[in-house]
Amino acid sequence: MRPAARLQSAIELVDHIILAARDGGASADQIAKRFFAERRYAGSKDRRAVRDLAWGVIRRFGKRPATARSAFAAMADADPELAALFDGSDYGPAVIDPAEARSTGGALPKWIKALFSALVDETEQASLLDRAPMDLRVNALKARRDEVAALLPEAEILPALDFALRLPGGTAIDSHVAVENGQVEIQDLGSQLIVEACQAKGLGTVLDLCAGAGGKTLALAAAMRNAGRLIATDTNRNRLDQLKPRAARAGATNIETRLLNPNKEKDMLSDLKGGCDLVLIDAPCSGSGTWRRNPETRWRLDAARLKRVVDEQAKLLDIGSEMVARGGHLVYAVCSLIENEGKGQVAAFLKSHNGWRAVQTGVSMGRADGDGVLLTPLHDNSDGFFFARLQKL
C-alpha cells in the first residue's frame, strides 16, 4: 500500500472506532482485528502503519472527534509529512480544504482532570497515554521464573514480585510455547500487585466477585497452590466462559465458576454469606488507569457513565462485605485514578459500614492514597490502579 492509501485506511478504521465508542460497540482492538481480516491484501507492514496512524489520533484527542478526517486534518496542520498524504490520489484521501472542520481539544477531557486523585498532577496526567510495556506473570503451578526467563531472553525480571517479567510493548507473545502451555499469563504488574495484596496463600474460601475472564482468579489459584476453595463469579456469561479453558491450561484445579443474575447477587451467593476468608472486588470502573492500553475508552466516558460505575462499585462493596467472615478481608480494586472511584469509595464504605477497618496491603510499591494504595504509570511503571485491603472485625 502507498502511504496515502495507508492514511485513507486509518481514517476508515478510526471512523469505525468513533461509531463504536458513541454507540457502546466493540473495543478498538476488536474493531481493528475485524478491519484487517476484511482487508487481507494489507501486509504486516501495512497493518502496522495503519494501526500506528489510527492510534496516534486516538491518543491525541481526549474528546471523541466528530469524524476521523477532522482529527487527521487537525494533526496535519502541524505535520507537513502527514499533510502531504492528503493528495487526492487513487485510494488516498482528498486534498484538505482550508475551511473544512478540524477536531479540537487536548489529550485529556477537561472535565476529567478535576476528578483525579491529588497525586495525579499535570506531569502524571501527561504519562497516562504513553505506550505500555507487556507484563507477564509466571504461573507458579507450572514453572519457576528462571525457567520462563530462559525461554524469553529479552524479558526483564521485575524485582517487585517473585513471578513478574516484562517485555517491550507490542511484543508478539500469544503463540509462544510458554503461553500455550500455561507457564505464563499476560498480566500487568498492577494487577499482579493487587493479587499480592490479597495474601491468599493458605486461605480456605476465597471469592472473586467480579472475575471477568479470570486473570486475577488464575493468579489467586497459583497463590493458593490449588488448595482451598476459589469461587469466581460474574454477571457476564461470555467473559466468565473464558475462564474454564484458561484454568485448564494453567493447571488451576480449585476454581468454581458461578454466573450471577444482575440484582440477584446476594440471593445467589447466600450460601457464602459470612463464610469467606477473602473477597476480591475488582470492580467495573472508568478504566482511566488503562488509557495507555485502551486510549479510545476516553471517548466512551462521560459524567453519566462515571456516576453509574461509582454507584455499581458501592453496590458491589455492600454485596461483597456480607460474604466476608469475621476476621476475614475484602480487597477492593479499580483500574482508575479518579478519586471518587478509589479513596472516596472506600471512605464512604467505611463510614456506612460499622465493624470494618482498613489495614496494610503488604505491597511495597505505590503511594498511600486515603485508606488505600495508588499505582500510576509514571510513578510505578504499571497501569493505574487504586486498591485497599479491609478487615471485618
Image (spheres, rainbow, N blue to C red):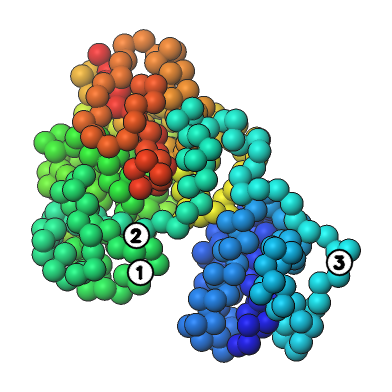
Q: Is residue 252 visible?
A: no
Please state if 323 lies on the left or on the right of 202 as rendered.
right
Residue of label 2: 134
Relative depth, front residue between 121 and 168 = 121
Examine the rendered structure and indicate whether residue 67 appears above or below residue 382.
Answer: below
- Disc 2 residue type (three-letter): Met
Which residue lies at the image location 54% right of the left edge and 76% below the top edge? 49
**Image coordinates for residue 337, horizontal then vertical, percent:** 47, 36
Cβ–Cβ below 8 Å for labels 2 and 1?
A: yes
| Gap in angstroms between the C-alphas marked 3 and 1 | 40 Å
Given residues 108 and 230, the one toward you in this image is 108
| Lower position in the chain sequence, tag 3 or tag 1 | 3
The amino acid at mark 3 is Pro
Residue 171: image tag: 1
- Residue topped by disc 3: 98
Secondary structure of the residue carrying tag 2 is strand
Q: Is residue 197 left or right of residue 282?
A: left
Q: CA distance from mark 3 to mark 2?
A: 41 Å
Indicate whether 122 appears above or below 73.
above
Res. 242 image quadrant: bottom left
| Residue 367 shown left or right of residue 198 in the figure | right
Mark 3 or 2: in front is: 3
